Amino acid sequence: MLSADTMYLDEAYAALQGKRATGAVAVFDLPNVLATKRIAVVSLRHPALMSEQLIDSATRAFEGLGLASFAGISTVDVVPIGFDKVGAAERVLGAAGCWLREAVAFGDMPNDLGLFAAAGWACAVANAHPSVLAAAREVVQSNDDDGVARKVQQLFDL
């Protein structure tokens, strides 16, 4: 779970992640954290299931409270309703006097599909999820090959 200022990991999630996030706090009393902190995102992992196998259960479990989306091949993120990537991008760009339909969006997982639909140009990295590749207007080099950085350099003639 991620609040505005701290990441909270239970021991099982930390073990599945394979490493501890810097600054993360181990959670032993989940109800207390939920009662005292405003949570920005809940990340779910399972020792044997991939995100495509978890998404339906997560969607049902958080129905009416949050939106579940693919954050990685083994992770499902749940964010409060109205606090998705599209809303965040619209708020940040709007504050700068820009429109999302005039922006370039980059993505790799299905949680980027809403952003792809709203942005003016959608670029998937080459190693993106198949649904993201299908939705992209352009495919750039993989994230391992600095595809986003190379495209930004091209766009800004750097």
Image (cartoon, grey):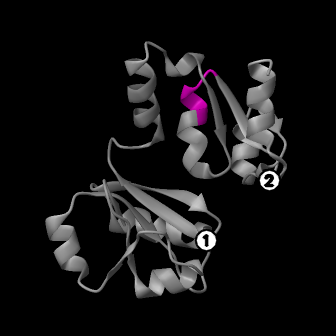
Give me the disc on residue 127: 2
Confirm whether the magenta stretch covers residue 76: no
Residue 74 got which mark?
1
Dividing the picture into quadrants, the one containing residue 113 is top right
Q: Please tell me how crowded label 2 is: few (under 14), some (14-19), or many (20+) other residues with Cα within 10 Å.
A: some
Locate residue 97 relative to residue 104 in the image: left or right: left
The picture quadrant where one finds residue 154 is top right
Q: CA distance from mark 1 to mark 2?
A: 15 Å
Q: Which residues are magenta?
A: 116-120
Question: What is the secondary structure assignment of the residue under circle 1?
Answer: loop
Residue at (46%, 71%) from the top-left corner? 44
Mark 2 secondary-structure assignment: loop
The 10 Å Cα crowd at callout 1, few under 14, some 14 to 19, many 20 or more, is some
Report x, y in % for residue 83.
35, 43
Does 30 sit left or right of 54 as displayed?
Answer: left
Lower sequence index among marks 1 and 2:
1
In the image, residue 8 sits, relative to residue 93, either above or below, namely below
Residue toward you, 87 or 8:
8
Residue type, numbered disc 1 = Ser
Whether label 1 touches label 2, CB < 8 Å: no
